Image (cartoon, grey):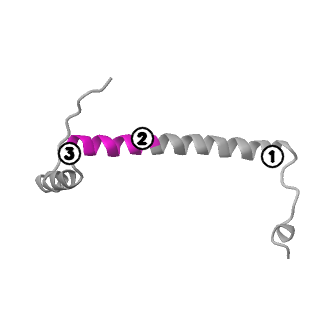
Amino acid sequence: MKRNLTIQLDEEVVREAKVLAAKRGTSVSSLLAHYVTKMTSDRQRYEEAKTRALKAMDSAVDRGGVTWTREELYDR
């Protein structure tokens, strides 16, 4: 379900947004909807990746932790 959202922007920002939207063949509303959707999607993907990384680190520790030295890691 889609809902309307009212925002307030400076006149210059609105003017520039209209120009940008026109160049892209869309409306300011669609332009803003696209960017807000992308930002929320990016945030969700980040949180999912962070959760996976933390689980992987936890499981590495559960398997005995670090078993190498710094010198071994960098072949020194």
Examine the image and state in which quarter residue 71 appears.
bottom right
Q: Earlier in the sequence, mark 3 or mark 2?
A: 3
Q: Residues within 10 Å of mark 2 (few under 14, many from 20)?
A: few
The percent position of residue 43, horizontal first and vertical second, equals 47, 43
Q: Which corner quadrant holds the C terminus? A: bottom right
- In front: 25, or 69? 25
For disc 3, the marked residue is 28
Identity of the residue drawn at 25% across and 41% down: 30
Is 55 placed above or below 2 here? below
For disc 2, the marked residue is 40
The percent position of residue 68, horizontal first and vertical second, equals 87, 61
Which of discs 2 and 1 lies nearer the camera? The answer is: 2
Identity of the residue drawn at 67% across and 44% down: 54
Dot 2 lies on which element? helix
Examine the image and state in which quarter residue 33 appears.
top left
User: Residue type at mark 3?
Assistant: Val
